[in-house]
Image: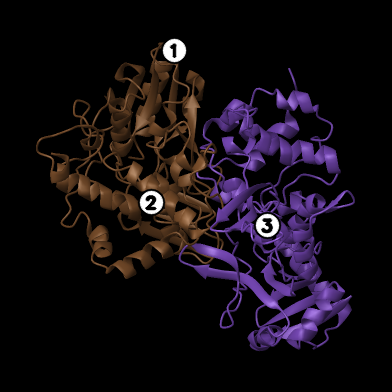
Amino acid sequence: MDTCIEKIRTICADLLAKGEVQKVIGFAEGSIPMASRPIAVTAKADVEKLVFNSFCGLNLANYVADGLPKEGKIAVLAKGCDSRNLVTHMVENQVSRDQLYIIGIPCTGMVDKRKIAALFEDDITDFSEAGDTLTIVSPQKKETVSKKEMLRHNCRMCTHRNPVVFDVMAAEPVEEQTLDQPFADVDRIAAMDPDERWAHFQELTKNCIRCYACRNACPLCYCPTCFVDESAPQWVGKGQDKTDINTFHFLRAFHCAGRCTDCGACVEACPMGINVRDFTRKLNKDALELFGWEAGMDMEKRPPLDVYSPDDPDDFIK
Amino acid sequence: MNFITIDKKDWAGGIDKSRKTFQVFGPVQDENGCQIKPLAPDLYPLMDAGVTTVMSPKSVLFPQTEKMLTATLDASHEDHHVMKPVEKADTPRAVLGIRPYDARAIQLVKLNFDNPDYQDPYWCGACAATTFVGLGVNRPGPCDFSTSTGCGPFSEEGLDVLLADLDDRYLAKILTQKGETWAAACGFDTKADAAESQALFDILKKEAEKNITASVDTDRLSEKSLLDLHEAPFWEDVAFSCINCGTCTYVCPTCWCFDIQDETKHKTATRFRNWDTCMSPLFTHHASGHNPRESKVQRVRQRFMHKLKYFVDKYDQGIMCVGCGRCVASCPVNIDIREVCKTMNNYEKE
């Protein structure tokens, strides 16, 4: 994965030089260790700024709908999950296929920064990776760890590492993972009795500061005005009341039902380390079990929540 | 200046003694990182100079949600629908283990909440009741650039006590009367030699400052034309990656903006104030529906212009940033105020 950057740069330079795309949306090197920054490259000379590493954990599908050119295309780098969110955008009419040039990146997963930070008592000052080997340095020590051991949970649970739609691939496809227990985390919460489960979710959101980084990092959350930002009338209180905080999280999760690709951008973005996926994963499981549906896999099929089907598993709708 | 030495073996006992007079706040670690919180009687502050709290201590004086006024809506009461101040007990509190840059931040926030024209009763009451016991930062992290912002790892501004961690003991420099009172309440009274102690502080300070590798130049910001900076072409690039969440403003120790909301429940109305963020479109959404900062780039520009230009021009006290690096560390898309400051400081209109 870390070797495909040269090919990505060549592809992008070529696209920009030939005028086939107006800009390329990708990742640039971060200013601190273990960070990357989404970037739009418009000049061929700037393709050197593009990087791809194990910290490109945000979802670039979030950046395509804003600033689409009136004519012509934009290119976007897409990991497996980003590509599925591009499909979701197309299915939901946010962007059309002919506006995009998709540079597919087979992905071996993104690394969990918090897990790495927990290995150290002091701040990390340097980071490098080669294949599966991550080398992390702080003033006190140097650690070498396997990337596989440090993957984010959603990346460990990912069965679509290769892009599902692309114009060009930046590398050979990678082997897909097969999982014995794809929803062990959901099952664990589902097995709790109601009080215990309520307590789990209360605990989960206790540090939420309502910065909405989870929502804003999510490619699904493109409503022109989010329900929590409505002011006439106002639906939800703005303060730190638990009910208001939970209302935000619960409703946002339901709004993602049958649409979430489990890309993990919400968790990546949360400054408070809240595993927001505890809300969305249950809905992903339901979508799969009830409707045989995984979001963003097929541009021709309508999502389960916007079609009527005589085979619907619920009787009330028939 | 008064110095005392505190054996770490006596630290917890001293804090316990002080709890009779003080509500104690301090850094605590949980699975979501380190936070400044009121400490339950069995909890002690995490006094590790290498740890930065995710959130700053500004909430001790300026809670994210604060009740201001209440009214009864029950018409059988004579004073129904009349907003009355909430009873607020500003009992003594001590915030332990805050970083020197956070103490400076409180001095900057004070310019807004406590000035000749206006004194915010909520903030001023809380500030008067609070004793700030800082801990010098022996090993500043990679995001720390506090020596560029008028403070640094052993700055004393805004603190009542500055502690230095000397492995088996703390050396405490008592800076104010409030600090004296706190030390007395803890029973910390082992005097240390003033000249020797100051020399130790000087060495620690020098060593710590050497470890700060990040710096920003702010010297030319005040001479720049406000309109040139406002119209500068770099804002689109700065703003591209921004997802317009409120993380930078909420983790910032100097961001002081708030919103006022009225809520009713049954027969009680309450007026709250909540932290607000200039990153949100709602921040400037007028009742007419017009929004003067409708686009993302306008909002990103506002945040940096406020911190690095409007504040500089209005108060002549440097930038509205203490170099704690929290926004740099927490920004989901790695927007780095140090880079933006450099760009602004170096900008020349073509």
Of the 4 image quadrants, the one containing the N terminus of chain A is: top left
Mark closer to the observer (1, 3): 3
Q: Residues within 10 Å of mark 1 (few under 14, many from 20)?
A: few
Q: Quadrant of residue A181?
A: bottom left
Chain A colour is brown
Disc 3 element: loop
Tag 2, which chain?
A: A
Tell me which amino acid carries mark 2: Phe
Tag 1, which chain?
A: A
Tag on residue A70?
Answer: 1
Disc 2 element: helix
- Residue A110 in view, yes or no: no
Tag on residue B80?
Answer: 3
Question: Whole-percent x and y of residue B187?
Answer: 76, 88
Q: Residues within 10 Å of mark 2 (few under 14, many from 20)?
A: some
Question: Whole-percent x and y of residue A199?
Answer: 38, 67
Tell me which amino acid carries mark 1: Lys
Q: Which chain is purple?
A: B
In the image, residue B76 sits, relative to residue A304, either above or below, namely: below
In the image, residue B24 sits, relative to residue A38, either above or below, namely: below
How far apart in space, not on screen, are marks 3 and 2 (Cα)?
36 Å
Q: Nearer the viewer, residue A210 or B142?
A: A210
* Residue reaching furthest to the left: A311
Position of A287 with respect to B42 (left or right) is left
Circle 2 is placed at which residue position? A250
Choose the circle earlier in sequence order: 1 or 2.
1
Position of A234 with respect to B188 (left or right) is left
Position of B159 with respect to A147 (left or right) is right
